[in-house]
Amino acid sequence: MKNIIFIAPPAAGKGTQSSIIEKKYNLPHISTGDILRDEAKKDSELGRYISEVLDNGELVKNEITYELLTNRLSQSDCKNGYVLDGFPRNIEQAYKYDEILKDLNQELGYVLKLDIPQEVLEKRITGRRICEDCGTVYNINSINEKPQTESICDKCGGRLYQRNDDNITSFKNRYDLYIEKTKPLLDYYTEKGILYVINGDASVEEVAERIDKVLKEGM
């Protein structure tokens, strides 16, 4: 299996779709957001810096992201491919990612773009709730994705929380950055012939089927 990159605006569901591919194809799901949030929990100068940046809806310095990502991709479970979401976010990161792949003797693989209207994304991000124990994601703005009991996980009974950056102000900052930075990135991967645009404004199952079709056709 080839490496897979997801490019999508905040709350587009790339984490959910990455997890589905992870289970189906037995590939590690690597989220730069998760890597950064894990680091932000540490009581260190770097952890505190990352925490502040994420809370403000801004982006962490490239050099830090490169180092943390390279360390993760160097691990043995990535040798046969992986699913990467949240990186690269701009053309400069794409060039750096090419360098990282060359050093690791890895191929670029697929680039999947999830396409969803902004108003849909706003409802998703302001309503998103996550279980602090098992990580299950809910959305209080969606009838089909609400927990049965408010603030309680249906699966394990854990407490649901809202990420600090899941608010409308933070979303707009992140969305505007996404639009500004990703156009050259999308053009870059289009020229390479490896960009696939997926309509993400559908159920999780429908989007997963569309992605699976692309991956099977490319095998």
Image: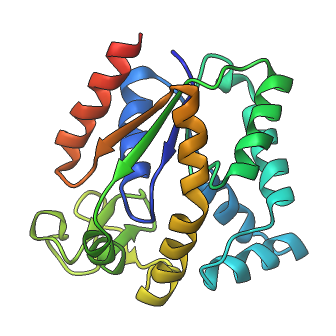
Q: Position of residue 76 (x, y in %)?
A: 73, 23
Q: To which quarter of the image does residue 56 belong?
A: bottom right
Q: Can residue 82 be seen in this view?
A: no
| Residue drawn at x 42%, y 21% as measured from the top left | 25
| Residue drawn at x 41%, y 87% as measured from the top left | 168
Residue lying farthest to the bottom in this orientation: 169
In this view, 96 is above or below 28: below
Q: Position of residue 143 (x, y in %)?
A: 10, 70
Q: Position of residue 213 (x, y in %)?
A: 27, 23
Horizontal relation, residue 11 to residue 60: left or right: left
Residue lying farthest to the right in this orientation: 45
Residue 188 versus residue 139: which sits nearer the camera? 188
Residue 102 versus residue 136: which sits nearer the camera? 102
In this view, 28 is above or below 10: above
Horizontal relation, residue 147 to residue 22: left or right: left
Q: Is residue 29 visible?
A: yes
In this view, 176 is above or below 109: below
Residue lying farthest to the left in this orientation: 143
* The C terminus lies in quadrant: top left
